Image (tube, rainbow, N blue to C red):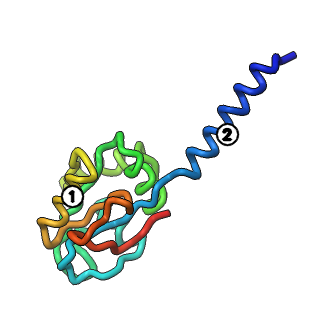
């Protein structure tokens, strides 16, 4: 028979896991504030970040910026936008790079670096937590 301590510890763990799932921040897919691209679908964004397309809807060559694998926003972005987990994304890019068909998105260390890169490059696209968005970039897709 379980002690009260074990029972309540289990409940605390389940509660923490449920709350962590609800506490995920919104992720915003961003482009340069002067970009002609106003909105994008998840399929369009997914195509760029999975190497299936290298252009923005405006026709400009896309310069994609990625967060590091350790970033929670990266996992949320890929699972919600592409429907793939980190290992699947990594495997897909390994095949593309090996075959010489595409170059993966530029990985930057922080969300601030992604925002700075996108703000400085007219054809850049990236993603950051929505709360970090400011006037230097434009949101083209919100991911809940």
Residue 14 visible to an observer of this rendering: yes
Query: Which mark lies nearer to you, 2 or 1?
Result: 2
Residue sitting at 20 percent across and 52 percent down? 113
Residue sitting at 31 percent across and 64 percent down? 133
For numbered disc 2, what is the local secondary structure? helix
How crowded is the residue under tag 2: few (<14 C-alpha within 10 Å), some, or many (20+)? Answer: few
Res 127 → quadrant? bottom left
Question: In the figure, 86 relative to 144: above or below?
Answer: above
User: What residue occupies the far right of the structure in this picture?
Assistant: 1
Residue located beneath label 1 in the image: 102
55 or 135: nearer the eye? 135
Q: Give whichever of discs 2 and 1 has the lower sequence position.
A: 2
72 or 44: nearer the eye? 72
Residue sitting at 36 percent across and 77 percent down? 40
Image location (x, y in percent) of residue 99? 22, 51
Q: Say which mark, if any, is on residue 15.
A: 2
Image location (x, y in percent) of residue 92? 35, 51
* Quadrant of the frame with the N terminus: top right
Question: On the rendered structure, is 66 left or right of 76?
Answer: left
Image location (x, y in percent) of residue 91? 36, 45
Give the Cα separation between the discs numbered 2 and 1: 43 Å
Res 105 → quadrant? bottom left
């Amino acid at each position: 028979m379980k002690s009260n301590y074990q029972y309540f510890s289990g409940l605390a763990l389940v509660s923490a896991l449920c709350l962590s799932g609800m506490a995920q921040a919104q992720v915003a897919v961003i482009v340069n504030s002067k970009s002609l691209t106003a909105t994008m679908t998840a399929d369009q964004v997914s195509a760029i970040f999975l190497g299936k397309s290298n252009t923005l809807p405006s026709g400009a060559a896309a310069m994609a910026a990625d967060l590091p694998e350790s970033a929670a926003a990266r996992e949320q972005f890929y699972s919600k936008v592409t429907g793939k987990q980190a290992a699947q994304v990594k495997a897909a890019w390994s095949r593309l790079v090996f075959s010489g068909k595409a170059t993966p998105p530029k990985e930057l260390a922080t969300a601030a670096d992604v925002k700075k890169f996108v703000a400085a490059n007219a054809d850049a696209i990236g993603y950051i937590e929505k709360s970090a968005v400011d006037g230097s970039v434009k949101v083209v897709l919100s991911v809940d």
